[in-house]
Amino acid sequence: MSSAVMDTLRPRRATVTPERPPLREPKVSSIGTRALLLEAPGAFELCLQKRIWAVAHEVESWADVEEAVLGVTNLLVVFSKPPRDLLATRAALIDAWHRLPEKAVSGRIHEIPVIYGGELGSDLAAVSAYSGLPREEIIAIHSAGEYTVCAIGSSPGFGYLHGLDPRIFMPRKTVPSLRMLKGTVTIGGMQAGISVNTGPNGWNAIGWAATPMFDLDKTPPCLLAPGDQVKFLVERIEL
Amino acid sequence: MIEVLSTLPLNTVQDLGRFGARHYGVSTSGVMDPVAFTVGNVLLGNPDNAAAIEVQTFPFVVRFLADTNFAVTGADTAATLDDHDVPPWWSATAKRGQTLALRPPASGARAYLALAGGIDVPVILGSRSTHLRSEFGGFGGRYLQQGDVLRTLDGEGHAAPWKSGGLGVVPPSFALPATNGRVLPVRVLKAGEYDLFSAEMQERFWATEWKITHHSDRGGYRLSGQPLKLAAPVELRSYGLVAGIVQVPPSGEPIIQLSDANTAGGYPKIAAVIEADLWRLGQARLGSFIQFEEATYEAAVEAMTPVTDYVARIRRTADLYRSL
């Protein structure tokens, strides 16, 4: 870590604005010697994700940071070698969390046509049963939403989408689907997604989208980026 | 240039890994035993990250289509070059037309075939490693098949042939022994959710001789033993993973995430294998046993010194020998 960064590391109190209660402490934990995980406290809120984006942006400029990997209200900082002073590095992460303003990302807006239901949306009935809402209404609610890409992760180009209407939250399956098709539009707990690889998947399938999420011939290869907005369009309904 | 004469699935072109693309959701891939891989390149005077073949299913047989210096490291595969034995951890010169055969190893799990210059496949997102699940990187994004012809960089046989029978090194299983017993000790640092487990479960984590099940691969090792249960289930929001992280899914049987693991997951994490022991895990066989030992941060960092010293000694010897 450069001395310029170190100068900003002295413990400080969180900046507290009068209208806003102080932020609770984030959790920082080690994963081996070359990675630290910063986790926001409390339940999911988009404002927490914006703070995570801000910290990610800053730590990418730190010396010896190989990569800042965004998660959902958390950030994995991977170092190219073990930090010499682990405690100072942890303190620096916590300081950045308190100090930095939320990062406003004005991302792109993606409109993604979806074929709802049918063979490729085979869990629509289960979501309907769980929510007590008719299938048509699940589709109406899902396609009316505006979703924010929190992070890209798990598989190439996969976006963790926030903004699902709580009426159609649906827990992940205990027994995953063995061969879910790439492009499947899914609900996993409070999150929405579009699968990027054909294979086992524990999220609930409600439709399918042809839009490619990952293309190595493009720079960057991912269609979605953190901070982007996603809207689902009803292309067709198969009930 | 070599031609693959005989192979089984899952033998791939790899380098140290695709670091820096996790934020695209792209897992690192890369060799499971970076020590064996690096030594192969060092013996040949290659860049340390030159791509090689990771062989994990045997027999694996190639024919040389040009005079080429090669090295075979990692698991002891009783290799032969035509009718001559090739000792383990050995580099030699193959003549055009000669056949190199790697057989099922008596110990260890993965062997590395490195060629002078390194294997010439495209660099994708900073690496030549094969990403099997996404079908890119390495040789056409797939595992090698009979009839594949692999080229090397810098033209053929750019390195002078070994003047004598070649050069070998003491394998790290002798130079850096871990155990003589049947259970491989694996040093770990505690991770984020360790303290959520009861004292009884923590004790069980350390005391159990965990078996590496047959549902294990480059993506991760699934362990079997008495399950580790949490008082209340914990589902974390998805967070980034690194190789060596030990997660405990609801079944209670730990998973060690490795080279081909997804970049993010949500299972509670109890520990992480220290970097100095990851290569040993890469050579651990399905059905074998491991036991976790706690390391301090300082000890975990220091544990890399014997590994880097070992590689540095080989580098000095190989450079000297090559200059004679």
Image (tube, coloured by chain):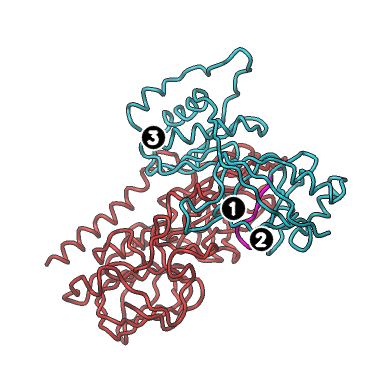
Q: How many marks?
A: 3
Q: Which amino acid, mark 2?
A: Pro
Q: Which amino acid, mark 3?
A: Trp
Residue at screen point 50% across, 43% down: A69
The subunit letter for the residue under badge 1 reads: B
- How far from the left and from the top, in percent, is residue B200? 65, 42
| Cα distance in 3D space between marks 3 and 1 | 40 Å
- How far from the left and from the top, in percent, is residue B159? 20, 70
Residue A6 versus residue B100 in the image, above or below: above
**Closer to the N terminus: mark 2 or mark 3?**
3
Q: Which chain is cyan?
A: A
Residue at screen point 65% across, 30% down: A42
In the picture, the disc for residue A43 is: none
Q: Which residue is mark 3?
A: A62
Same chain letter for marks 2 and 1: no
Pointers 2 and 1 in contact (C-beta within 8 Å): no
- How far from the left and from the top, in percent, is residue A189? 72, 45
Q: Which residues are magenta?
A: A192-200
Q: Which residue is mark 2?
A: A200
Tell me the quarter of the picture where residue A7 sits. top left
The subunit letter for the residue under badge 3 reads: A
The kind of secondary structure element at disc 3 is loop
Q: Which residue is mark 1?
A: B208
Residue A163 versus residue A94 in the image, above or below: below
